[in-house]
Image (spheres, rainbow, N blue to C red):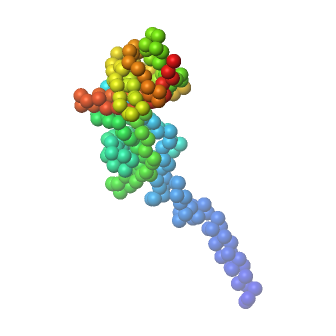
Amino acid sequence: MTTSRVPNIVLVLLAASLLSCDPGAVSSGRIHPMDPGNPNFIPQRPGNISAVFVPDEDGYVDGRVLVQWSTSSHFEDGFLIERSHGGTDLFVEVGTVENRVLEWMDTGGDIHPGTWYRVTSFVRRDGERRRHLTEPVRLNFGQIVFPLDPAYFSTPSEFRFTIEKRRVYRDGLMVELIEPQGEAETLLDTQEETTLVSVDNNRYTRHRLRLPYDGPVAPGSRIRVSWYIIVSGQPQVVGQAEQLVAIY
């Protein structure tokens, strides 16, 4: 009787073995966290986030900002764009786009120095949006550098210097002489030299400036170049560059 039961036991063990090898039986209770079928799935964070001005045909700031990003995931339901004027913790939602859309245009015109953007991917679950928080990026106003030291020549009396403008979008340019005690004298304040420099990070435009000046220049004086945008009718400085003056 004992030997007659052995085949039945073998059959039972074989059937259990076949069930355990069923892929469906294994995966049904062990869904990978990155599987979109997982109820707790959250898509990957977008990367390469950037925010730059889209100037008008004359190169002036007109309030439009192009926010772009990239993604290696195709399972998100969309992207959420947030903006902050008060630092990296005070964000409000300003736009959303659907899956596979990798840019968004901010046309609100509410642009200030210190503007930040954040882009996050999300999925909709039970009427809610589940998403990753991402690091914010600051709106790129560009920069000005001095490739050559500013020099003051007594004959003729003038300042001569060169500046490089890199991705600079602005409404105005100001040049000041800063004395060693800190007092500032405006040498130039104009909106004439405000054409768009470049929309390519690898390019720049160089400008040579010659500004007449009849007064004495003290050793230790500096030249300060500021660029600004107009916000609600008022100039807002968005960047500065300074360099010591070489006196001849």
Q: Is residue 141 visible?
A: no
Q: Which is nearer the eye, 225 or 112?
A: 225
Q: Which of the 4 image quadrants contains residue 103? A: top left
- Residue 96 vs residue 18: left or right? left
Q: Which is nearer the eye, 21 or 94?
A: 94
**Residue lying furthest bottom:** 1
Horizontal and vertical percent for residue 124? 38, 51
Total numbered labels placed on residues in the image: 0
Whether residue 214 is situated above or below residue 240 in the rendered picture: above
Quarter holding the N terminus? bottom right
Residue, x 53% and y 22% (percent of image)?
A: 148
Residue, x 46% and y 53% (percent of image)?
A: 42
Q: Which of the 4 image quadrants contains residue 54? A: top left
Residue, x 61% and y 63% (percent of image)?
A: 22
Whether residue 196 is situated above or below residue 23 in the rendered picture: above
Residue, x 50% and y 21% (percent of image)?
A: 247
Q: Which is nearer the eye, 176 or 80?
A: 176
Horizontal and vertical percent for residue 26? 58, 64
Q: Which of the 4 image quadrants contains residue 32? A: bottom right
Q: Is residue 94 visible?
A: yes
- Residue 141 vs residue 20: left or right? left
**Residue lying furthest top:** 156
Whether residue 63 is situated above or below residue 116 in the rendered picture: above
Q: Which is nearer the eye, 35 or 11?
A: 35
**Residue lying furthest left:** 233
Horizontal and vertical percent for residue 172? 34, 23
Horizontal and vertical percent for residue 205? 49, 19
- Residue 146 vs residue 233: left or right? right
